[in-house]
Image (tube, rainbow, N blue to C red):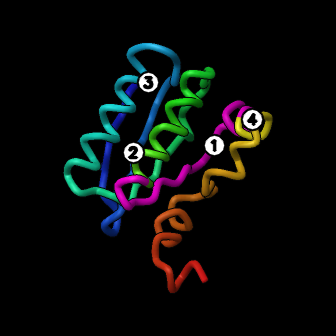
Amino acid sequence: MNIVTREVSHITIVDINGRITLGDETGRLRETIHQLIAAGKKKIILNLARVDYIDSSGVGELVSSFTTVRNAGGELKLLSLAKKVQDILHVTKLYTVFDIKEDEFTAVKSFDYFFAK
């Protein structure tokens, strides 16, 4: 799994490429989220367009990341879910928990409360 972070309009986008599974992958995602929070980055988008597989530990890590960011006073949103990831979130009913956006422009603008309303 490869993780790259970038900034767009004061929003941190975390591009994830690969599989989110038990072990090193979930640990790296957790570490990335904790580093962003420690750096004061509280508006985070996880870009999952290139995540081709996620297991139950990966789903748990998404929920954990969401909770960590929320507890720090921030927001975490998901972007561009691959079909397999989308299916898993529907089966687990987690699509009702996460704010999921289809494209980057909409995801970034959704943090702007004037635009979102």
Q: Amino acid at mark 1?
A: Leu
Image position, residue 37 (x, y; %): 28, 49
Distance from disc 3 to disc 4, alpha carbons, whole Å, reads 18 Å
* Residue shown at the point (54%, 26%) measured from the top left: 58
Element class at badge 4? loop
Mark 3 or mark 1: whose residue is earlier in sequence:
3
Where residue 114 appears, as percent x and y from the top left, is: 51, 86
Judging by the rendered image, the residue that carries numbered circle 1 is 81
* Spatial separation of the CA atoms under disc 2 and disc 1: 13 Å
Query: Of marks 1 and 4, which one's residue comes earlier in the chain?
Result: 1
Query: Does dot 2 land on a helix, a strand or a loop?
Result: strand
Between marks 2 and 3, how big is the CA–CA gap?
14 Å
How far apart in space, not on screen, are marks 1 and 4 (Cα)?
15 Å
Residue with the mark numbered 2 = 14
Q: Nearer the viewer, residue 25 or 6?
A: 25
| Mark 2 or mark 4, whichever is nearer to me | 4
Depth check: give the residue in front, 25 or 80. 25
Residue hosting label 4 = 92
Segment tinted magenta in the rendering: 71-88
